[in-house]
Image: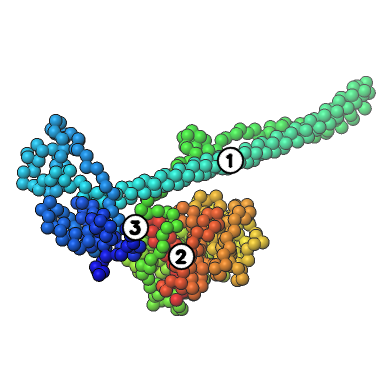
């Protein structure tokens, strides 16, 4: 006869094959019977079948034990632990040992403490309840919390390392900037010195020429006077000849006198002295510093990481940016994050800029432009720049205190400028197949033509400002290039799934985010070395044809502009 829940076995009495997750009664297995366990006693740390469990509950010594049944049973036996004697001394009663636990106040104490302070509480002996604590809910939660603390400390170590790297990069950049500025100052002073010294030399050359002419005239007149004197001397004994010579000489003497007077006048040359620039002299006397260090705090938080590797975007909502003034369907071709609560959009078809209040999730400002914009960059909290290819210019706009957009000034460029990026008083602009680096006044610092570029789709500075990235869409193949400021290609990113590259942005930790603007879209996450990390939002129902991407590290939010 076969008993329910019992497994047959051979003469050896070995444990039969157990199904997945199946446990056996320990008292029965000790007698060679393998019966499936129906319950587990936390106090005894033992599994029981239905029959043994009934007996266990009836016995006086075990009737109050905690029994777990069904899915509540642990998957394996809890390891045996020793119940050692309590030995920790009480802080208040230094001769008493801590032996008791008050569940009402969740505190441990000695017998004197319990008598004096916990008379009305439920008090238990630690040695009676400590075995059940092991691997219990509170113990497990405590272990999880400790694990979280250790992970947070590990994350903190990574943040400290990143902060040290930032500090070293900041130090190197600051030192380089100081030396560059000092070099500019030296160049300016050298040029100013050369200019004023050239002026002094011109004065000297001019006066030297005058003195040479005077000396030549003086010698000529001196010879003429000597000749007249000799002639008078020779005619001194001939009355008629002397008289005639004297009359002739008298006429000539008037001319000589005039010439000598004029020579005296020319000899009175103007002198000069050097007068230092009052502005530069004031700077020197005031000992004004060469510059100042502006503190920038980079918040690194293990719960708000810059590193996006282990994150996956979740759809949070849409913002409607269509207005009654729009004359065509919206075509948001570019965007730039001004602050965690504000983003600016470039609407190509409607020839305007639109600013969105992220917190209120609504359009806050609209500004009509004279031409179709292609890209927009944030210069400062109150200044943005937009490219207008048809006008061959960059239009700057100010965000006023009344939260309106006002056109500020214009930079004319050498062609149909399309893409733009700004960082550290430097602009990088992209035409179709070439790049220019500009000063803020529009002066071209350098032109960087490149044979690898055929249709520039995006430009962005690297996080350390030492390099920059350019995305290129040739139609057949899309790529992302990493350049130095001499135009050398340092790294290249190619991926067969990147079919139509559009928006490009760089996060504070150096990670690149690039839009793959197709129907089955995705966002490529790329390392600073142009290596693929992963793809985000693949075939997401909420996102189609993304044209631009922005990331806010303060709020951990990703913003995409899509073509509906």
Q: Find disc 1 in the rendering and name its residue.
A: 183
Q: Residue at x 21, y 47 (%)?
A: 131
Coordinates of residue 550 in the picture (x, y in percent): 44, 62
Where 146 falls versus 521 (above or below)? above
Q: Residue at x 62, y 39 (%)?
A: 190
Q: Compute the Cα span from label 3 to label 2.
A: 58 Å
- Quadrant of the rendered image containing residue 246: top right
Q: Secondary structure at mark 2?
A: strand
- Whether residue 479 appears in this view of the structure is yes
Q: Residue at x 50, y 66 (%)?
A: 515
Q: Compute the Cα span from label 1 to label 3.
A: 93 Å
Q: Nearer the viewer, mark 1 or mark 2?
A: 2
Q: Secondary structure at mark 1?
A: helix
Quadrant in which the N terminus is drawn:
bottom left
Q: Find disc 3 in the rendering and name its residue.
A: 12
- Quadrant of the rendered image containing residue 182: top right
Quadrant in which the C terminus is drawn:
bottom left
Q: Find disc 2 in the rendering and name its residue.
A: 536
Q: Nearer the viewer, residue 7 or 409?
A: 7
């Amino acid at each position: 006869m076969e008993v329910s829940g019992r497994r047959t076995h051979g003469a050896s009495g070995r444990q039969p094959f157990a199904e997945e997750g199946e446990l056996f009664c320990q008292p029965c297995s000790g007698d060679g019977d393998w019966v499936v366990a129906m319950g587990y006693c936390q106090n005894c740390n033992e599994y029981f079948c239905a029959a043994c469990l009934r007996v266990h509950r009836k016995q006086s010594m075990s009737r109050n034990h905690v029994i777990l049944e069904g899915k509540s049973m642990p998957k394996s036996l809890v390891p045996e632990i020793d119940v050692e004697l309590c030995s920790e001394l009480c802080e208040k009663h230094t001769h008493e040992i801590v032996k008791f636990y008050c569940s009402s106040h969740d505190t441990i104490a000695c017998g004197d403490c319990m008598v004096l302070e916990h008379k009305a509480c439920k008090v238990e002996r630690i040695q009676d309840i400590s075995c059940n604590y092991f691997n219990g809910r509170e113990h497990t939660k405590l272990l999880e919390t400790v694990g979280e603390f250790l992970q947070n400390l590990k994350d903190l170590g990574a943040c400290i390392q990143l902060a040290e790297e930032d500090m070293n990069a900041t130090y190197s950049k600051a030192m380089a900037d100081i030396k560059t500025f000092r070099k500019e100052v030296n160049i300016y002073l050298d040029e100013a010195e050369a200019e004023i010294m050239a002026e002094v030399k011109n004065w000297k050359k001019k006066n030297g020429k005058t003195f040479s002419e005077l000396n030549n005239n003086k010698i000529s007149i001196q010879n003429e006077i000597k000749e007249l004197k000799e002639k008078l001397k020779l005619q001194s004994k001939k009355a008629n000849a002397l008289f005639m010579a004297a009359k002739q000489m008298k006429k000539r003497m008037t001319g000589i006198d005039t010439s000598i007077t004029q020579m005296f006048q020319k000899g009175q040359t103007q002198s000069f002295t050097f007068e230092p620039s009052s502005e530069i002299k004031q700077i020197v006397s005031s000992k004004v510093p060469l510059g100042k260090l502006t503190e920038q705090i980079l918040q690194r938080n293990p719960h708000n990481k810059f590193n996006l590797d282990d994150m996956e975007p979740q759809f949070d909502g849409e913002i409607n940016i269509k207005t009654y003034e729009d004359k065509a369907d919206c075509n948001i071709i570019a965007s730039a994050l001004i602050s965690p609560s504000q983003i600016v959009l470039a609407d190509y078809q409607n020839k305007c800029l639109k600013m969105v209040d992220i917190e209120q999730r609504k359009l806050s400002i609209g500004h009509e432009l004279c031409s179709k914009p292609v890209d927009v960059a944030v210069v400062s909290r109150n200044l943005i720049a937009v490219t207008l290819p048809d006008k061959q210019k960059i239009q700057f706009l100010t965000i006023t205190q009344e939260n309106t957009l006002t056109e500020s000034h214009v930079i004319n460029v050498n062609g149909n400028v399309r893409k733009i990026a700004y960082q550290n008083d430097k602009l990088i602009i992209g035409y179709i197949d070439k790049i220019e680096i500009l000063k803020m006044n529009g002066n071209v610092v350098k032109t960087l033509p490149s044979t690898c570029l055929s249709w520039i789709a995006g430009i962005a500075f690297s996080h350390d400002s030492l390099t920059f990235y350019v995305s290129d869409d040739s139609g057949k193949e899309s790529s992302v290039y990493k350049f130095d400021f001499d135009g050398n290609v340092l790294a290249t990113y190619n991926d067969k799934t990147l079919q139509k590259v559009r928006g490009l942005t760089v996060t504070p930790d150096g990670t690149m985010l690039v839009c793959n603007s197709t129907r089955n879209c995705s966002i490529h996450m790329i390392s600073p070395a142009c290596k693929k990390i992963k793809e985000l939002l693949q075939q997401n129902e909420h996102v189609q044809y993304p044209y631009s991407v922005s990331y806010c590290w303060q709020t951990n939010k990703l913003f995409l502009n899509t073509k509906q």
